[in-house]
Amino acid sequence: MLRTLIVALALILLPVVAEGQTPAFRSDRIVVTTRGEGPDVILIPGLASTSDVWARTANRLDDRYRVHLVTVRGFGNVPAGSNTDGALVAPVAAELRRYITTQGLERPAVIGHSMGGLVALRAAADAGRDRRGAQVGRVMVVDATPFFPSLISPGATVGDVEPLARIAYQALLFLGDEALRTQGSALGQQLGGAADSVFGSLGWQGGDRGVLAQGLYEVMTTDLRSRLPDIAAPVTVVYGWSADDRSPRAHLDALFAAGYRNLPRPARFERIEGAEHMVMIDQPTRFLAAVDRFLG
């Protein structure tokens, strides 16, 4: 009798999914909120940012598209969940693909900024390799490259950067968010150039120190250049640019082109004059025009 009552109570309390209704998505890696109706667009923020950085973009799109706003657990005030253990970029990319599958998204457009760009590229590469899995329709990476240190020092390798990445990891883990602001420029200069694309703190919303440290380490050491041939989806690259020859951003065109040369189809590049790393915040009007062209 007691067992029957427990089963009955469980059936009452469990959420009911009507026939044809998509089940709620639960993840220990990411949190996703959805707004609007139409073709699917997924927005992924960068290191230590939440979906708040996409507010203006989402407001522009949600009357024509179904916008999926992703936040990586451990960034901002979002509980870290399983992101406290081990790697970050690859598991988050896997969860993104699981989200696409379980929610029945049909070849969504994926837009990722900074570390979110690495996640988007990894998800697209995995989708291209596994034809049975979730498919990505198109990808826009915002101020992101398959190997970030190549924007600072073109000849850099993972081996070159890894000792600096360990220093950055320890500094952020033990000294907190302020370490990124005070030590980031110095570390970037050791690599020989502009550091804002790796260490830029504008838009930094903090979070769990362990997750932030791991994220920074992976931004510095992840090299996806060998995975680019797996990407079947078209790729658009948007980045901040300066007409001032004295600015390191005036010389990024060739570096971005070199970073994406292994794609099976050439990437489309859009430079946004006057923007630094937080392109969508620095030059929102120009950025939104680029997004419209990407989605159009």
Image (tube, rainbow, N blue to C red):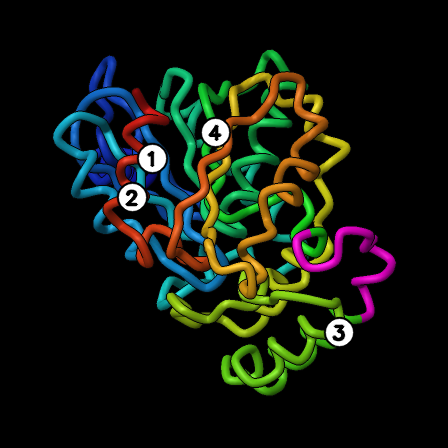
In the picture, residue 211 is in which quadrant? bottom right
Cα gap from disc 4 to disc 2, whole angstroms: 18 Å
Q: Earlier in the sequence, mark 3 or mark 4?
A: 4
Cα gap from disc 1 to disc 4, whole angstroms: 13 Å
Q: Earlier in the sequence, mark 4 or mark 2?
A: 4
Cα gap from disc 1 to disc 3, whole angstroms: 33 Å
Cα gap from disc 3 to disc 4, whole angstroms: 32 Å
Q: Quadrant of the N terminus?
A: top left
Viewer-closest of 50 and 253: 253
Mark 2 touches mark 1? (CB < 8 Å): yes
Relative placement, left or right, of 238 versus 294 is: right
Cα gap from disc 2 to disc 3, whole angstroms: 32 Å
Disc 1: which residue: 290
Closer to viewer: mark 1 or mark 4: 1
Residue 211 seen = no
Label 2 environment density (alpha carbons within 10 Å; few <14, some 14–19, many ≥20): some
Viewer-closest of 121 and 195: 195
Q: Position of residue 14 (x, y in %)?
A: 26, 37
Relative placement, left or right, of 259 versus 272 is: right
Disc 3: which residue: 190
Q: Position of residue 138 (x, y in %)?
A: 46, 23
Q: Earlier in the sequence, mark 1 or mark 3?
A: 3
Give the residue at x 62% y 82%.
183
Disc 2: which residue: 286
Up/down of 179 relative to 156, above or below: below
Q: Specify the segment rendered in magenta.
A: 151-163
Mark 2 touches mark 3? (CB < 8 Å): no
Give the residue at x 23% y 29%.
66
Mark 2 secondary-structure assignment: helix
